[in-house]
Amino acid sequence: MKYLLILLLIFISNYSKGVGPENSAISSNLTIIEGKVIDENTGEGLPGVEVKLLGSEKVIYTDFDGNFSIVGIVPGSYSLSADYISYKRKIITDVKPVTGSSNYTIKLRMIDKSAPQSRLSQAPKA
């Protein structure tokens, strides 16, 4: 019983110090991709833009000023996708975060609503 109590105390003390995969030597190589999504014409930050790290399950949304941050990225080559209602989706390729932090500005262009609609979106009149 005494040994079980000692093992339990050791486990709790190691757990509280953060021993685990998120604090291992491997995690010291992880990077951060951060940046801002802005309107191409006005330069203002866009809130609520969906930013995806393509090829992974990482999806985040920009804050009120258009800022985003994706943490825990293994260095490599990626693509980012930015999608926002009434704006054309933009994909940034060849994103290569380095150890530490990489900063990107993504400019989105508003969809031109005055352009003619395709035939598929026009309902036939009876």
Image: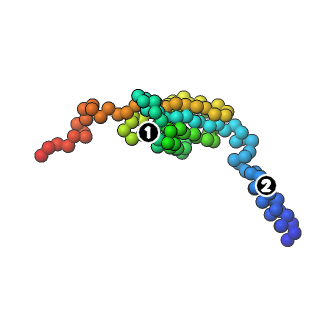
Left or right: residue 22 versus residue 65 is right
SS class of the residue under badge 1? strand
Q: Residue at x 72, y 46 (%)?
A: 23
Residue 102 at x, y percent in the picture: 61, 32
Give above or below for 126 relative to 77.
Answer: below
Question: Label 1 sits on what residue type?
Answer: Asp
The total of numbered circles placed on residues is 2
Q: Residue at x 80, y 63 (%)?
A: 8
Left or right: residue 20 versus residue 70 is right
Give above or below for 40 relative to 2.
Answer: above
* Quarter of the rendering occupied by the N terminus: bottom right
Q: Residue at x 63, y 34 (%)?
A: 101
Residue 37 at x, y percent in the picture: 49, 35
Among the 4 quarters of the image, the one containing residue 119:
top left
Does the rendering let one see residue 89? Answer: yes
Is there CB contact under 8 Å for labels 2 and 1? no
Residue 28 at x, y percent in the picture: 71, 39
Question: Label 2 sits on what residue type?
Answer: Asn
Mark 1, Cα crowd under 10 Å, few <14 / some 14-19 / many 20+, is: some
SS class of the residue under badge 2? helix
Mark 2, Cα crowd under 10 Å, few <14 / some 14-19 / many 20+, is: few
Q: Residue at x 40, y 31 (%)?
A: 109
Residue carrying label 2? 14
Q: How is the image coloured?
A: rainbow
Q: Residue furthest left?
A: 126
Give above or below for 4 relative to 109.
Answer: below
Left or right: residue 111 versus residue 121 is right
Q: Residue furthest bottom?
A: 1
Residue 83, numbered circle: 1
Cα separation between marks 2 and 1: 42 Å
Residue 46 at x, y percent in the picture: 46, 38
